[in-house]
Amino acid sequence: RIAPAARKIGSVVEFIRTHVTDRIGVADVAAQLGYQRRSLERLFREATGGTVLDAIHAIKLEAVKAIVRDRRNLLSGIAERVGFSSEAHLKKFFKSQTGMTMSAWRNAFSG
């Protein structure tokens, strides 16, 4: 049996994964799942030690890495595919999360 808090956290993560290509924020997640933003943030932090925004960023980063890893994909246009407002924003986000540019990361980690 899954505890109610774990079910709620699971629904948050599932919503984020389902909408990873959209420009979603914490307020969007809370509204869609019927929570007040502060309540959702508190519940999420107590259950995971992180924030909903951390989860959004982690899931978006997974999606970007999957696209970058495939050498058939151009690096331009990824921002729009994964819900970033611009290529510049994605590049800054990716480098802040990985310490590498997308092309350097691709060269180091793609098969």
Image: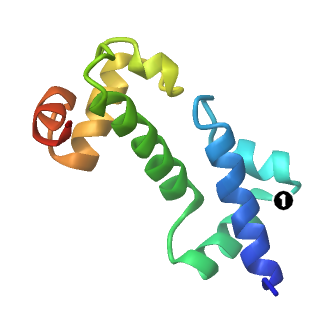
**Left of 105 or right of it: where is 33?**
right
SS under mark 1: loop
Residue 104 image point, x, y percent: 11, 32
- Most extreme residue toward the front, as rendered? 111
Quadrant where the N terminus sits is bottom right
Residue type indicated by callout 1: Tyr
Q: In the rendered view, would you say 49 is above or below 75?
A: below
Residue depicted at 62% across the width and 46% down the height: 17
Question: Residue 35, relative to residue 66: is it above or below?
Answer: below
Task: Name the residue: 66% across, 37% down.
Answer: 19
Q: Which residue is mark 1?
A: 35
Picture residue at 17% right of the left edge, 42% below the top: 109
Question: In the rendered view, does 79 fall on the left or right side of 92?
Answer: right
In this view, 91 is above or below 46 = above
Colouring style? rainbow
Asked whether, in this view, residue 3 is left or right of residue 74, the answer is: right
Viewer-closest of 10 and 49: 10
Which quarter of the figure has residue 93? Answer: top left
Foreground residue, 42 or 20? 20
Question: Residue 70, percent across and down?
Answer: 31, 27
Q: Position of residue 54 (x, y in %)?
A: 48, 57
Which part of the image, by quadrant, shows the C terminus? top left
Q: Residues within 10 Å of mark 1 (few under 14, many from 20)?
A: some
Residue 76 in percent (x, y) is at: 32, 12
93 lies above or below 70: below
At a point 71% along the width and 58% down the height, the residue shown is 12
**Residue 59 visible to an observer of this rendering:** yes
